[in-house]
Amino acid sequence: MAQAKARKVEPRLIVVKHPIGGLNADELRERIETATKGLAEATDTQ
């Protein structure tokens, strides 16, 4: 966040919701893939 502020750009975060007990490997993989897709769409790269 400090680097973004120093460069005078809006810092953006991707928050991946997860259950209190954690995720199994398949659930984690799915969440990462979904977050990656969202990031690619937000930055117009795929």
Image (tube, rainbow, N blue to C red):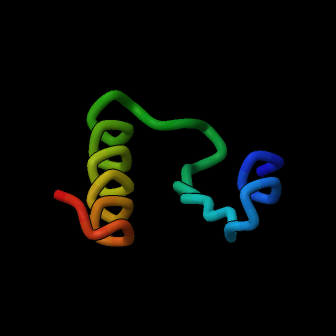
Q: Position of residue 23 (x, y in %)?
A: 46, 37
Instruction: Determine whether, in the image, residue 32 is placed left or right of residue 45.
Output: right
Query: What is the count of numbered marks?
Result: 0
Q: Position of residue 29 (x, y in %)?
A: 29, 37
Q: Residue at x 68, y 70 (%)?
A: 10
Instruction: Determine whether, in the image, residue 19 is placed left or right of residue 38.
Output: right
Instruction: Determine whether, in the image, residue 7 is placed left or right of residue 17.
Output: right
Image quadrant assignment for residue 26 = top left
Q: Is residue 21 above or below residue 8?
A: above
Instruction: Determine whether, in the image, residue 9 is placed left or right of residue 28.
Output: right
Q: Position of residue 13 (x, y in %)?
A: 61, 59
Image quadrant assignment for residue 28 = top left
Residue farthest toward the top in the current orientation of the protein:
25
Residue farthest toward the left in the current orientation of the protein:
46
Q: Residue at x 68, y 67 (%)?
A: 9
Q: Quadrant of the C terminus?
A: bottom left
Q: Residue at x 29, y 60 (%)?
A: 40
Q: Residue at x 38, y 71 (%)?
A: 42
Question: Which residue occupies the foreground of this view, 43 or 31?
Answer: 43
Question: Which residue occupies the foreground of this view, 38 or 44?
Answer: 44
